Image: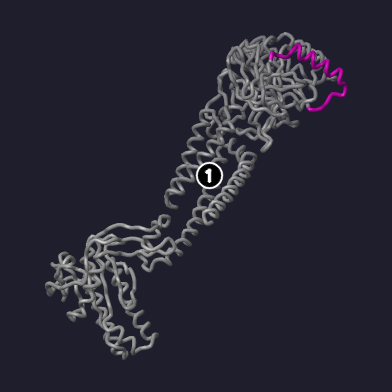
């Protein structure tokens, strides 16, 4: 029944632990882990500079202070003309969307569209929107035209992870712009729902079962000459280069985590940045025969991203997202980072759910083992060391572009610690109850301590051991008790036993039992003492002195004269538990015990107080003054034997 209760207690505790762990997992993954990810990325992953192969041209504060926002599109045309005509760029990415014509400056639109039409290495942005189209037929017609012109070969081989797209339609280009542009990529972006940070790139978006690459992916395909992308459950593969990009899926599309780089000093950018107005001025200077503000060689063989982000202008132009690196990270820089990730194969991998559970399980099991095997202090030190080692492991992983959970495993370890320590203390409390039950079977504190050490192994049986047994008996106790009340007798006995018990303990002895007015003590077991015969003799000698003191006190109080007789024998005996399964007694039995009792009884015959056997005398001959009593007949013994009366000992301290 008790075993059943213990099992049920463990089962209920474990169920509670699992439930608490599950709740913590949900809270941690949704709230704590995203912030931990940001911290680890900023401090341990983004530790290298971005490639200088990519640069950016930004409509910044300097640009908007010269030309008021919104810009006329002939200004864009000048930027693109300078880059395409004079700079020998490798590829240009335009992180912006035009969805309408400028009715006030149609000539400016015409200049832009004509310029764009001449550029063969320009990829522009487009966007999908949530709204359903008002004219479904026209929308479907535009979608088909868009896919026919800008679509790429994206094959879907996913089996498990498919979600319907949330997007309803395109944010449409003006027709003239549509006709001018040669390549396009999505600039849709998704923030992490839990904390609003942008940590991944919308690699592929979809509308009506047609798939479109991001701006950065489209640029990578052009740079590498790849013409096919294949989507699998956990990654996207670029067929020509073999690049595998780990992905996660949502209603917003297929995402890859961004590997961020260091932010350049005193900027908000990972790449070298040029002001758009300086390119316009450079173009005008070249046309007027003057040296350019920015030498075209700065952009030779470079991948150039063009975008807008101006914070200080009268009309703010903020194209920025919160990322682990910056609260307002320019969108054009994020697009460039994505492309750099693909080119340099700086791929950020995220630990799988299976990996996370294995780590959590391993830490939990290790925590249980440590707490169960070591003391509280040692286990705490080991657990702190374990947590520190895991943090070092997490830092190592982030430095190698592998993002693991940081807070969750340590949080689960903390819950496991609380549960394990609580369970341990509860179990120890139950063990104390066992000890209380065991106390009813034993009288000696020393025996109780031995029981505590082996609380789960209390059983019948024992061992043979060399011990010294001491018997002490009050002389004339029967006649004395007849003349006194029971209360008076009890008071004298209690005072006597109270005074001699510390003496026996002092010499490593254990009181085995009180037999009426007699005391039986054991030396050598269960307290291990190689010098037990000497200590037993010293103990008896001090007991006799204490009785002398008590006798004087009792005579002064009008109580009867009391004397004791002591008998000691040393030899092998059986030491252990005897009795039944329900009632045990820790004792010593054998001829050694019987002989000690009979030697004590000879004090009456020879009118002595302190007798020892020849086996005991062999150990104490150098410290004890004795009188030999030769050839004593011991009841139960065929041969006569010598016993010794101890008169004094030369040394009283153990």
Q: How is the image coloured?
A: one colour
Q: In which quarter of the image is residue 572?
A: bottom left
Which residue is painted at 37% across and 62% down in the image? 449
* x and y, in percent, of residue 223 in the image: 62, 13
Q: Relative to 651, is 422 on the left or the right?
A: right
* Residue 437 shows in this picture: yes
102 relative position to 541: left or right = right
Q: How many marks?
A: 1
* Residue 146 magenta: yes
Q: What secondary structure is the magenta-colored segment mainly?
A: helix
Res 436 quadrant in image: bottom left
Location of the C terminus by quadrant is bottom left
What is the x, y in percent for residue 253? 70, 25
Which segment did they paint magenta?
A: 130-153
Disc 1 element? helix
Q: In this view, does 455 lie above or below 232?
A: below
Is 357 one of the magenta-colored residues?
no
Find residue 467 and report its image quarter.
bottom left
Residue that badge 1 annotates: 413
């Amino acid at each position: 029944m008790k075993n059943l209760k213990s099992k049920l207690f463990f089962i209920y505790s474990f169920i509670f632990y699992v439930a608490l762990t599950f709740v913590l997992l949900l809270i941690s993954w949704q709230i704590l882990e995203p912030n931990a990810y940001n911290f680890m990325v900023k401090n341990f992953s983004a530790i290298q500079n971005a490639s200088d192969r990519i640069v950016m041209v930004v409509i910044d504060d300097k640009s908007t202070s010269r030309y008021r926002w919104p810009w006329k599109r002939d200004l864009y045309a000048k930027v693109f003309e300078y880059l395409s005509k004079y700079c020998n760029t490798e590829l240009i990415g335009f992180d912006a969307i035009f969805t309408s014509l400028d009715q006030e400056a149609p000539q400016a639109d015409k200049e832009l569209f004509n310029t764009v039409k001449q550029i063969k290495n320009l990829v522009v942005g487009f966007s999908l929107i949530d709204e359903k189209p008002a004219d479904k037929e026209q929308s479907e017609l535009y979608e088909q035209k868009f896919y026919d012109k800008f679509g790429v070969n994206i094959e879907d081989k996913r089996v498990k992870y498919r979600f319907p797209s949330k997007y309803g339609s395109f944010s449409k280009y003006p027709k003239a712009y549509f006709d001018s542009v040669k390549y396009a990529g999505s600039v849709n972006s998704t923030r992490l729902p839990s904390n609003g940070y942008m940590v991944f790139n919308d690699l592929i978006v979809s509308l009506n079962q047609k798939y479109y690459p991001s701006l950065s992916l489209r640029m990578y395909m052009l740079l590498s000459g790849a013409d096919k992308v294949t989507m699998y459950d956990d990654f996207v593969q670029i067929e020509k280069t073999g690049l595998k990009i780990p992905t996660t899926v949502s209603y917003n599309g297929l995402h890859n985590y961004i590997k961020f780089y260091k932010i350049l000093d005193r900027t908000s950018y990972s790449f070298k940045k040029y002001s758009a107005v300086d390119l316009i001025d450079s173009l005008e200077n070249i046309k007027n025969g003057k040296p350019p503000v920015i030498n075209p060689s700065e952009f030779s063989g470079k991948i150039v991203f063009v975008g807008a982000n101006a914070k200080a202008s009268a009309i703010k132009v903020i194209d920025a997202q919160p990322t682990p690196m910056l609260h307002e990270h320019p969108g054009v820089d994020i697009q460039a980072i994505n492309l750099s990730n693909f080119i340099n194969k700086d791929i950020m991998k995220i630990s799988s759910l299976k990996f996370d559970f294995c780590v959590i399980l391993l830490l939990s099991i290790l925590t249980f083992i440590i707490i169960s095997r070591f003391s509280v202090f040692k286990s705490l030190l080991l657990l702190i060391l374990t947590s520190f080692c895991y943090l070092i492991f997490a830092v190592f992983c982030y430095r190698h572009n592998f993002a693991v959970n940081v807070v969750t495993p340590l949080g689960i370890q903390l819950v496991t610690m609380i549960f394990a320590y609580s369970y341990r203390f509860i179990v120890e409390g139950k063990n104390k109850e066992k000890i209380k039950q065991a106390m009813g079977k034993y009288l000696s504190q020393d025996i109780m301590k031995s029981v505590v050490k082996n609380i789960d192994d209390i059983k019948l049986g024992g061992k043979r051991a060399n011990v010294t047994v001491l018997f002490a008996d009050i002389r004339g106790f029967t006649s004395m008790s007849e003349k006194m009340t029971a209360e008076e007798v009890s008071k004298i006995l209690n005072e006597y036993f109270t005074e001699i018990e510390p003496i026996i303990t002092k010499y490593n002895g254990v009181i085995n039992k009180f037999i009426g007015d007699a005391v039986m003590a054991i030396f050598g077991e269960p307290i291990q003492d190689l010098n037990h015969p000497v200590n037993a003799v010293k103990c008896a000698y001090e007991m006799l002195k204490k009785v002398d003191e008590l006798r004087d006190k009792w005579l002064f109080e009008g109580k009867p004269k009391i004397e004791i007789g002591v008998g000691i024998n040393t030899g092998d005996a059986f030491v252990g538990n005897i009795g039944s399964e329900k009632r045990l007694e820790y004792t010593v039995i054998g001829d050694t015990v019987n002989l000690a009792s009979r030697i004590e009884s000879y004090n009456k015959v020879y009118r002595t107080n302190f007798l020892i056997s020849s086996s005991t005398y062999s150990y104490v001959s150098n410290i004890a003054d004795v009188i030999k009593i030769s050839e004593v007949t011991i009841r139960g013994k065929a041969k006569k034997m010598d016993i010794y009366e101890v008169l004094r000992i030369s040394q009283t301290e153990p």
